[in-house]
Image: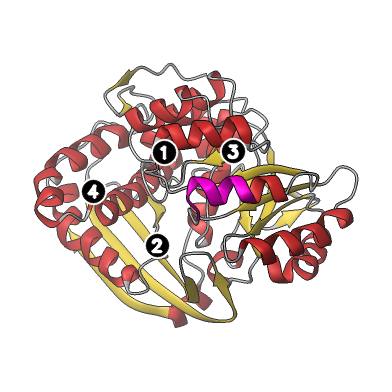
Amino acid sequence: MIPVRTEGNIMTDSSTSAAGGPIRIRRVDAWALRIDIERPVETSFGIMRNRPAVFVRIEADDGCFGFGEIWCNFPSCGAEHRVKIAIEELGPLLTAEAFASPEDAFRVLTQKVHVRVLQTLETGPFNQAIAGIDMALWDLAARRAGKPVSGMIDEDAAERVPVYSSGIHIGIAETVIAEARTQGVRNFKVKVGFDVAEDLAALKNLAPGIGDGERLFSDANQAWDIATAIEFCEGAAGAGLKWLEEPLRADAPLADWSRLASVGGIPLAAGENITGMQDFKAAINGGHLKFVQPDMAKWGGFSACLPVARMIRDGGLTYCPHYLGGGIGLVASAHLLAAVGGNGILEVDSNPNVLREAIPGTAIENGNVAISTAPGLGIDEIPPELMAYVTLHDHCSG
């Protein structure tokens, strides 16, 4: 196990800096991609009618490179905007100086754009762009070291991680779950939060079909107030739900989360909309969550989410990385879960998405995703067939 010490919100160890010396970046590229879809991805707060992704490639002056992904699902125009943030705002900072490690770069970028974030109030887009860049820097550092990212973090990292199928609208759950079973998947998460009575009726029809050894989860995407959440929990009693994800807004009073945990009867999950070590500490220590779900493409990358994931595990809770995007971020999430260990499962969107499926390392076999043993994340290029979906490409050179 790599020794780690924490300071503030991120790691400050030198675990990723040993191979090859300081990281000097000579080029940063970012691509926005979009693909039309036949089956929209519907949540309680909005509908995705196409699938976007922002992929990042960072190249050092020695020719070594790494790939990352920036979260960009909302708003619908967000992908292209994040490309501009990555290249025009962060790119010049990356190419201006050498960094001792990816953690060092994460800290420097976060500090140097702090006033810009205050000026623009665009905390999310900046966090997401830094997270994607951080992924790419960890990929680069692991390639230099000749190890997979998971193995660079922990030489005893798992060779594969179990998955759960997510993004399943409750209205079509029977069909989608049947599709997931053909890949050996035994864990399923359905989207609720649309209409309580209709959600409960569909859930009661679905629950008897969940077999031995299978688990059913639900996700309300912050749809309810405390009274409605309790109503749903009471109505879902007996349906066998193993967790209820984001029944309340991420910024709902802690007292509401605690009340729901004590009277709802269903274990609670959240984390994709929590950012910062202190807020994660508060959520973990609050006692209301059983499953904690940081999204490393949304905030933190490896540098910040690794210590959070270890804190979750050491606190006796289950680390289940949240993820719904393209394939690079999914592979990175799999590596982090494999390295951290515990009994968590990897979220894999059930909806067809070539921006995920074309990336090496995303295939599901017997309910698991295998962790590549190749250096880094095992991704050597953006597959050429995906270039047809690029809506914007930009770069910055040092």
Q: Position of residue 391 (x, y in %)?
A: 35, 80
Hey, what amino acid is under mark 4? Ile
Q: Position of residue 86 (x, y in %)?
A: 25, 58
> Label 1, on which residue?
302
Check residue 61 in the rendering and tell me which mark sits there, or answer none: none
Hey, what amino acid is under mark 1? Phe
Distance Cα–Cα, label 3 vs label 1: 25 Å
Check residue 268 in the rendering and tell me which mark sits there, or answer none: 3
Of labels 1 and 4, earlier in sequence is 4
Which of 168 and 256 lies nearest the eye of the viewer? 256
> Label 4, on which residue?
25
Distance Cα–Cα, label 2 vs label 4: 17 Å
Taking the spot 14% from the left edge, 46% from the top edge, the residue there is 113
Please report contact status of discs 4 and 3: CB closer than 8 Å, yes or no.
no
Crowding at mark 1 (Cα within 10 Å: few <14, some 14-19, many 20+): many
Of labels 2 and 4, earlier in sequence is 4
Crowding at mark 2 (Cα within 10 Å: few <14, some 14-19, many 20+): many
Hey, what amino acid is under mark 3? Leu
Magenta part of the protein: which range? Answer: 224-231
Q: Is residue 229 magenta?
A: yes
Taking the spot 57% from the left edge, 66% from the top edge, the residue there is 194
Taking the spot 35% from the left edge, 69% from the top edge, the residue there is 75
Which of 159 and 25 lies nearest the eye of the viewer? 159
Q: Position of residue 13 (x, y in %)?
A: 34, 22
Find numbered disc 2 in the image and state the secondary structure of the residue it sits on.
Answer: strand
